[in-house]
Image: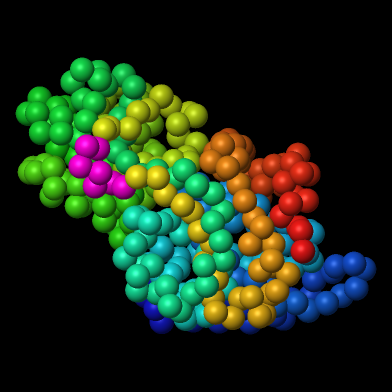
Amino acid sequence: MNTGMFKSFVVRIAASALCAVSLYGGEAVAAEPVKITITNWADVLAVANVAKYVMETKLQQPVQFVQADIGIQYQGVARGDVDLMVGGWLPVTHATYYARYKNDMDDVGIIYTGGKNGWAVPAYVPESELSSIDDLKKPDVMSKLNGTIQGIEPGGGLMQASEKTIKDYGLTGYNLQSSSEAGMLASVQRAYQSKQWIVATVWSPHWLFQKWQMRYLKDPKGTLGGEEQIHAFGSKQFAGKFPRADVFMKHFKLTLADVEAIEFEGNNTNDYAAAAKKFVDSHPDKLKAWLEK
């Protein structure tokens, strides 16, 4: 989605949302929604749906999701076209985007830590043959993988790091196959069904590790980064326009295990909104801490 399309899309959804009438506390009120920009990545869907559920049911604050690629998300927040994003990975994954837009955004806070990017293989691939990214240079390993690293959306931080990894490790002859998260997962599932070898660009937290036995390849050069912190970034107008939502987001903390549990439920039911509700309703202590003033 280019910049013009993104802005036009945001204007349209904002206008329609402002015209809508919501019922809260028995009174009809027209309320401007918090526009949260998302991608269809499991971790983002999990976190964003929890934030939406809490804002709408506990703060009586409507929320509007706006879908966009990650680079457009940063741009949209920096321009004030959207109010909030909840999947900012630092210090490595989104370093390029952060450096470009950091002066035009507010760092609302760290939602959780322990994020990880990497390349992973199914557990049935013998560790004696493939345990490290260096092992990908073996001719027989390359042959079994058809010279392919299965990727996700082009332009994402993980894909940028993967391109650097191919270069730094001298993986001549390998193709980084652009796709999407759904495309990557479908490739892993197909490989698993026939016990074929596959290397996929993956990250934690993700429900795939609960569905399939996968292991990360060792990355001795560290080109795919270490532990990441996942931030919420707001527009410069966010805190002033939505002060109560801003305070909530500053208190909004999850663990890696929390995110994976919501992801797993959301994927199994194909309903991330219901998974978020189930999680919040079963964790009253967390909710109480999030709603401190």
User: Dividing the image into 4 quarters, which one contains the N terminus?
Assistant: bottom left
Q: Tell me the residue at 47%/43% (across/down).
A: 114
- Region in magenta: 219-225
Q: Is residue 227 above or below residue 54?
A: above
Q: Is residue 250 above or below residue 44?
A: below
Q: Is residue 41 magenta?
A: no
> Would residue 236 appear left or right of 150 to someone viewing this image?
right
State the image coordinates of residue 119 (x, y, percent, origin top left): 29, 38
Q: Tell me the residue at 22%/30% (across/down).
A: 132
Q: Is residue 72 above or below residue 110?
A: below
Q: Tell me the residue at 30%/30% (across/down).
A: 121
> Would residue 209 appear left or right of 46 to someone viewing this image?
left
State the image coordinates of residue 67 (x, y, percent, origin top left): 50, 64
State the image coordinates of residue 276 (x, y, percent, origin top left): 67, 47
Q: Depth check: 111 or 209 in front?
A: 111
> Would residue 271 appear left or right of 90 to someone viewing this image?
right
Q: Is residue 220 magenta?
A: yes
Q: Tell me the residue at 37%/28% (across/down).
A: 214
State the image coordinates of residue 250 (x, y, percent, origin top left): 63, 62
Residue 82 in view of the camera = no
Identity of the residue furthest to the front in this view: 293
Identity of the residue furthest to the right in this view: 26
Residue 149 is drawn in which quadrant? top left
